[in-house]
Amino acid sequence: MTSSGLEPAGGVRVSSRQGYVVVDVETTGFSPAKGDQICEIALVSLSTEGEILDEWHSLVNPRRTTGAVHVHGITEAMVARAPVIEEVLDDVWQRVAGRVLVAHNTSFDLRFLRVLPESHWLTETLCTQKLAPDFLSAGKWTLAACCERAGIPLSGAHAALADARATAELLRFYMRQGVSWQEKLARASRTPLWSPSGRPQRPALGRRLQGQR
């Protein structure tokens, strides 16, 4: 069971059909076209009202060097026993299917997600960075800067779960100002029902976040 009491992948569907799923990926570089890969991924599922339903994350073996360790803190030793991305896609897609995908600087995350098998689940998206000028005073639009102006704590930046949690709170901050995206929610919910891929899957391998014991 997850911390929210909901079944993880491999059991029943994680949460209700409609809603949002916040994603963050840490990668070996900037371009999957040049061979860069995901080395960590996190997802936080929310209801249509913004209630946090479930969270999931895993290190991912990119089958190459992990890139900018000084940024994301992920070493080759940390991912040596981690699943490759195809071995956790059931966990990923069952959370994405039927929901609006949310990220901070969505174009970056989509660049890596759209090259994965079954990426047809990526139908409707929201970018908390592009939305920020409608809800926050002027300034830098990085996740850390937006969170600071919204009064949202962010520790352990550039760890996928920490960034996904902060992005989820930023979305909830926007929603508390009376907005919702009903048309996107409705369109996303009309995608086909998720079912397991049939590929061999492995358990997620998380990393300890800053401040955890």
Image (cartoon, rainbow, N blue to C red):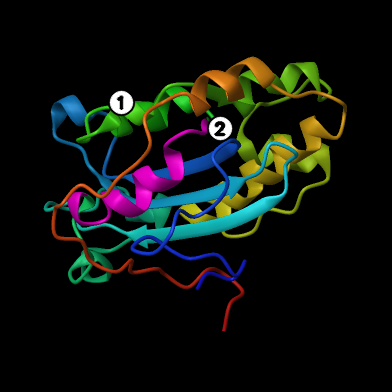
Relative depth, front residue between 144 and 122: 122
Mark 1: secondary structure = helix
Q: Is residue 89 magenta?
A: yes
Magenta region, main secondary structure = helix
Query: Callout 1, which amino acid?
Result: His
Give, as a single range, the part of the protein colored magenta.
Answer: 86-101
Residue 92 visible (yes or no): yes
Q: Where 182 sits versus 101, above or below?
A: above
Identify the residue under disc 1. 120
Q: Which mark is residue 166?
A: none
Identify the residue under disc 2. 104
Where is residue 145? Give x, y as percent: 70, 36
Mark 2: secondary structure = loop
Where is residue 201? Give x, y as percent: 20, 61
Q: Residue at x 63, y 28 (%)?
A: 128
Relative depth, front residue between 171 and 156: 171
Q: Residue at x 65, y 48 (%)?
A: 166
Query: Callout 2, which amino acid?
Result: His
Where is residue 110? Give x, y as percent: 37, 27
